[in-house]
Amino acid sequence: MQTGLEEQLGLYQKRIPIFTRSVKGRFRRFKTTVLVLAYAIYFLLPWLPWSRLDAPSQAVLFDLPGRRFLIFGLTVYPQDVVWLALLLFIAAILLFFVTGLVGRAFCGYFCFQTLWTDFFIWIEHKIQGERPARVRLYRQPWNREKLLKVGGTHVLWVLASFWTGMTFVAYYAYAPQLVLDFFTGQAAAAAYITVSILTISTYAAAGLMREQICTYVCPYGRFQSVMYEPETLAVHYDARRGEGAHGRASARAGQRTLDERHEKGLGDCVDCGLCVQVCPTGIDIRDGLQYKCISCGLCIDACNTIMDSFGFPQGLIRYDSEQNLAAPEPTAPRVEWKRLKTIGYGAALILMSAYLAYSIGTRGSYDRAVNQIRQPLYVVLSNGDIRNRYQVRITNKAARDQTYEISASGIPAGALDLGNFREITIKPGHSGLVQASVRLTPELAEHTHHFELIITPKGKPAEARSENVRFDGPKEEHD
Amino acid sequence: MSEQKLQSQTVQTTGHAWDGDLQEYNNPLPVWWVYTFYVTVVFALVYWTIYPSWPFGKGWIGGLSNITYVNSDGETKTHSWNTRALLMEDMNQAAAAQKPYFDKVAAMSYAQVAKDPDMNGFILSAGKALFSDNCAPCHQAGGQGVVGFFPNLTDDDWLYGGSFDKIHETITGGRHGYMPTFSEVLSPEQIDELANYVASLSGIGHDATKAAAGNVLFHSETAACYYCHGADAKGRKEIGSANLTDNIWLWANVPAASSAEGKVAAIRSVIASGLNKGVMPAWAGRLSPEQIKVLTVYVHELGGGQ
């Protein structure tokens, strides 16, 4: 009788280590270019100087205590949060747009998990050698050589992780001072906490977990599959050509040239396994499109190298669409963009980017908000006049002190009372409050429902902006 | 091939078959998940030692994290971590952060405070908080008051004077408005005549004959209204008597009445029953001098004080 306990299975799935072979080719070159560019920007940007009047001379500085984000010549305040919303929207639409066209291009070439894993594998490769050497090292018992090589790799990984965290924090404070403070124990607690969390998570994600992040943790990789369409270009193995009538076979004597192979009904795939060895997620692309594939194109490079060495045509593994591969007469792969979804995403992308550019390009030098005081809406004064009160908040977004004047139109001269502040001077990045009140005779109040409140930066009449504000009186109460 | 081949194999089964062909898939958890679980266990242990965790006897294990705060009686207390102590600590910090501003207010004159843009921002925010906590229950959130009960602080009428000093005096010492009950001294006809006279002062529809009689009565020793309201009926700020000639009504709810008779009736009822409800408490012991100063400026700015 079977009890189900004869053979104990492991309760947990151990990770099967992956040792990727390095490869040369178009996609490798592209990946390296992206990596170098992205790292140059990420690691050097906090050190780029930028002269400013009232803030540290750092080109990109997210000044959280000052509630402002300094990005080159642009100062972004929390009330500009709509820009962030637009940026996130654009990023999301860009992801949908690109994925529908060329598959998981973000995963394969631009995702920081991919970049950092790539960099960590490069370190591993430099210290421990090419794939066979690394496999041998993995299998051999712990000795001096293994200890030195593996230990050295991990030390470098931790250092790279640490500097990743350090650089992240450098965006939030004046970098040279921060680094000095950090190593003399004088930086803020938040700096130490952030750097340690990022060091640990970078080391764990890029050094230890690697493809498991994409497979088990990352939601993007999974939901991008719903954006694929039959026309979407993705990394595909041309099974029809590779398998032929009788499957793939190694290039032994007698089946070395294409003619010999086609004679025997063999496919073009020589089953060298290089595409599997170079894969950072450890899959076999010849099993078809699968969720673990991050679309990095390294198997294309590997296969093309082999095809070249045998004198076979390139492109046994290539970017192609499911539709084209299944067609009776496959054509050269091309980007199919004439689809309602793609055009829709493209239009949304252009619209939103244009709006963001317009919004940033035409930003004013100040923000204003005029609020009518609603408790009470109006006051009857001793001589019967009606008075409404308003709170005017002006935020100076320019780089220097600015004086603002407030005036009104649509009401008699002298009706606007600004109390002690005819004009107000506001420091850059600060807000000022002015209490304004408007007093009208009962007859006039009956006919006045709106008027214009005009805010003028002193010396810049072109930047004057007017706000249409309500005027309430006792009559309207019964409306 | 290498280890990698293994990853792209078909799903494992438990290896056990029921009824000949019924098998169960085995999808083991990835091992890093288990390690994450161990990390959470370690986290919990650290958490227990830092924060209050287990019941123990009649109390609990407080943990290593302590909060020190100064309570409302000025005593310094240290307590194991809890949200009430945390609130007290936060309040202490907030009070300390406000202190420079309050000190500045204390050192400046009223006129200086009102004209300083920085101080103006502080008065508007801190004053609003103080007003909402202490004054709004009667005078309402915006200081608009309630007709028949609490004076409107946003208009230009000040019973006791609207200068900084007078407002300060009012807040510090409180006020008590009083008007005797005239239904015991005067006949209903006389009260009606007086009411018509008061209505005529503000230009409200009235009976001219009764108002003329009321005028005489107002200035006579029988009713003696002028004792408090003055011969010109404009009130006396020293005792807080109302100005009867303006358009502002505090006790008689004249604005709410739609007809002229209703308005006169509202005035009549106040004369007949008198007033003993205009009581404002003294805030001298409850608020600090700096807080009263901030409130003084805030209230002054509400109605464009005098």
Image: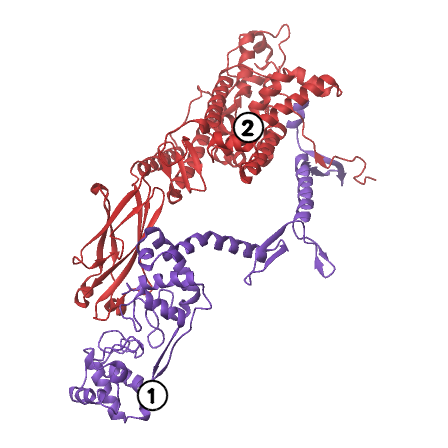
Chain colours: A red, B purple
Horizontal arrangement in the rendering, residue A445 relative to residue A17 (left or right): left
Q: Quadrant of residue A360?
A: top left
- Residue B82 drawn at (x, y percent): 61, 55
- Residue A83 drawn at (x, y percent): 38, 40
- Residue B186 drawn at (x, y percent): 28, 93
Q: Answer few, some or many: residues within 10 Å of disc 1's Cα (few below 14, many 20 plus, some between 14 and 19).
A: some
Please say if A416 is above or below A117: below
Question: Which quarter shows the N terminus of chain B?
Answer: top right
Amino acid carrying mark 2 in the image = Trp
Q: Residue at x 42, y 26 (%)?
A: A48
A164 vs A188, nearest the viewer: A188
Residue occupied by mark 2: A163
Residue occupied by mark 1: B181
Question: Which quarter shows the C terminus of chain B?
Answer: bottom left
Report the chain holding disc 2: A
Q: Secondary structure at mark 2?
A: helix
Amino acid carrying mark 1 in the image = Thr
Q: Secondary structure at mark 1?
A: loop
